[in-house]
Image (cartoon, helix red, strand yellow):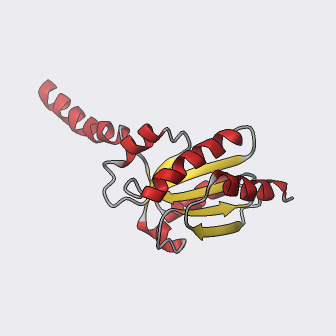
Amino acid sequence: MKKLFLSLLLCLLLPCAAWAGGLPSLDLAGLTDLLVKNKGKVVVLNFFATWCPPCRVEIPELIRTGKAYADKEVLIIGLAVDEDPAPVAPFVKKAGMEYPVYLAGRDIARAYGVSSIPHNVFYAKDGALALSEPGMADESMLKMVIDKLLDQK
């Protein structure tokens, strides 16, 4: 009986241990909930992939921007669109991405019309979609858009 209980317990804990090293997945309903919970903040969604050279250039810009607005009501969220989720968590750790990062469901990319990456989406403090643009954004562009959205009432 004891061996059966331990075997059962091990089977229940293994999926949790495997998930702990990875990143959470997010579907469109989960993202919508996340946006609602962060109403009152400027939210930046950054669609990226670990294999994307422009994304690799843009991520340090996002990290610096996030640090520059650490005391403001700004939230940057990374949305990985990699087909294979295995390299994403190590990539996030190595890149020093301190903002929340999720494995994005295909429904999210479809909903935002993401056809190329990087792709950035900006939400105003009132929760309204302000801008959705493909292409790499440098730190000055990110700050310009964020400042404009922070100044809105």
Question: Does 70 appear above or below 26?
Answer: above
Question: Does 129 appear above or below 72?
Answer: below
Extreme residue in the right direction: 153
Residue 76 in picture, x, y percent from top left: 61, 50
| Residue sitting at x 44%, y 43% | 92
Judge left or right: residue 104 versus residue 132. Answer: left
Image quadrant in which you'd find residue 107: bottom left
Q: Nearer the viewer, residue 68 or 74?
A: 68
Query: Which part of the image, by quadrant, shows the C terminus?
Result: bottom right
Residue 36 in picture, x, y percent from top left: 66, 57
Q: Nearer the viewer, residue 109 or 147?
A: 147
Judge left or right: residue 146 versus residue 76. Answer: right
Question: Does 104 appear above or below 18?
Answer: below
Question: Does 12 appear above or below 112?
Answer: above
Judge left or right: residue 121 versus residue 1. Answer: right
| Residue sitting at x 59%, y 48% | 61
| Residue sitting at x 67%, y 68% | 131
| Residue sitting at x 84%, y 59% | 152
Residue 77 in picture, x, y percent from top left: 57, 51
Residue 132 in picture, x, y percent from top left: 62, 69
